[in-house]
Image: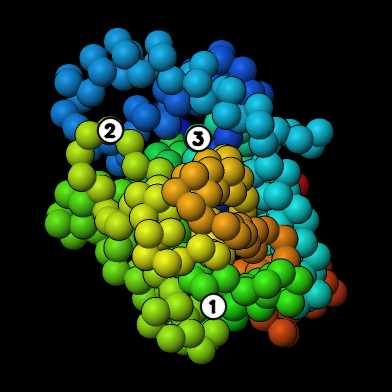
Amino acid sequence: MSRFINEQDYFHGKSECTGILITNLGTPDSPDKASLRRYLKEFLSDPRVVEIPRIIWNVILHGIILNTRPAKSAEKYKTVWTEDGSPLMSISLQQQKALQKEMEIRFNGPVKIALAMRYGNPSIPSTLLKLKEAGARRVLVLPLYPQYCAATNATTFDKVFDELKRWRWMPELRLVNHYHDHPGYIKALANSVLTHWEKHPRGQLLVMSFHGIPKRNLMLGDPYHCECHKTARLLAAELNLRPNEWRVTFQSRFGKAEWLQPYTDKTMQALPAEGIKHVDVICPGFAADCLETLEEIREENREYFQHAGGETYHYIPALNANPDHIKALADIIQQHTGGWAETSPNWSEAGQQKQAEHTLQNATAKGAKK
C-alpha cells in the first residue's frame, strides 16, 4: 500500500484553479467540557505553543490542566456563544464568503477561498484535500495573524507541510508570513477607530492590546514583539495621535513565567490612578472577534478598569468582515498570487478550454487515459 495520497483519478485536461487557504486559531465545536477538553488537548499539545520539555509538560497537561481547565473554559465560551455558534467561526465564514466574492470580481480565472482552523474543525488537512479535489494546483496560505509568531503562523505552516508531505503530487505553494505593516491593514484599523469615535465620545487613551507570548520567546528571536510595536506605531501615526494618547499592552498570559509586558489587565487596574478615567481598547492582532476579545477584553478588563475607579471603557471590535478589512486581505492575496495563471488578466475560459482539449488530445495519442 502506498504511503502517499495518489492521483488515480487524474486525467489530462482536468480543470485547475488557484486555492487560497485562510486560517485562524480555532474553536471548540460547542461550549461544553468534552469539546473544550478535545480542543485544549490539541492546542496545548503543540510544541510551538508550549516550549517545555515534553516529558514534563505532558505530566502537567494530562495530570492537571485537562482535568481542571475545560470546565472553566466552557463557562467562558458560553458567555460569547451565539445562535450561529462560535463567534470566531461565524465571523471567519463571513470573511471567507466576502473574500470569495471579491476574488471573483478581481480575477478572471477560478480562485477558491477555503477556510481552515489550526486546531479543531475544519482542519487544515481536510481543507487542503478539498482544495486538491477542486483542482488547486497552486495554493496560497494566508494565516489571519498580522504579526508573525512561531506559535501561530509557524505552527500553521507546520500543519500544512505535514499534510502535503503525504501527497504524491504537491501543489505550487506560497506562504504569507505576516502583514503587520501592510498599508491596507493599517488603514482598516484606523477607519475602525475613527468610525467608533464618530459614534462614541473619544477616550483619553487608546490602548492597543495584543495577545501575549512568553518573554523567553522574544529573547530566542521571535519577531512578534517588534511587529506588534510597529503596527501600533503605524496606527498611531495614521490617527495623528500624540505619544501620551496611545499605549501598547499584552493580554492572555498563561502560567507563571514572565510574558511580554506591560500586561493589559495590570494596566487597566493602574490607569485610573494615573488620572485616566476614559479609555478605548482595540486588539489589532485579532482578525476576528473571539473569546480573547469578547470575554477577556470587552468584559473582564472592563471590570478591572471600573473597579479601580475608571469611568468610560469602550472596546472597539476587531476588523471582522468589514469591507476595509476584506479589501486589505484581497490586496494581500493579489500581491502574493502574482504570476499565477488564474490571476493573470490574460486568462480566459475559452483559452483554457482549448488548451485542455489540446493537452488531452496529445496525451491520449500517447496512451493516457481519458
Q: Amino acid at mark 1?
A: Ile
Label 1 close to label 2 by CB (< 8 Å): no
Q: Amino acid at mark 3?
A: Tyr
Q: Pointer 2: what residue?
A: 255
Judge left or right: residue 74 versus residue 262. right
Cα–Cα span, label 3 and label 1: 28 Å
- When asked about the image quadrant of residue 162, the answer is top left
Q: Amino acid at mark 2?
A: Gly
Q: Pointer 1: what residue?
A: 186
Percent of width and height locating residue 103:
74, 69
Q: Pointer 3: what residue?
A: 119
**SS class, disc 1:** helix
How many numbered marks have been drawn onto this rendered protein structure?
3
Between label 1 and label 2, give the one nearer the viewer.
2
Between label 3 and label 1, give the one nearer the viewer.
1
Q: Is residue 282 above or below residue 83?
A: below
Whether residue 179 is visible: no
Judge left or right: residue 273 versus residue 311. left
Camera-side residue of 250 and 29: 250
| Residue at the (71%, 69%) spot, across then down | 200
Percent of width and height locating residue 202:
62, 74
- Specify the label residue 8 is tagged with: none
- Mark 2 Cα-neighbour bin, 10 Å: few <14, some 14–19, many ≥20: few
Residue that extends furthest to the right in the rendered view of this protein: 350
Percent of width and height locating residue 239:
54, 84
Q: Is residue 301 above or below residue 344?
A: above
Between label 2 and label 3, give the one nearer the viewer.
2
Q: Earlier in the sequence, mark 2 or mark 3?
A: 3
- Mark 1 Cα-neighbour bin, 10 Å: few <14, some 14–19, many ≥20: many
Cα–Cα span, label 1 and label 2: 32 Å
Camera-side residue of 38 and 353: 38
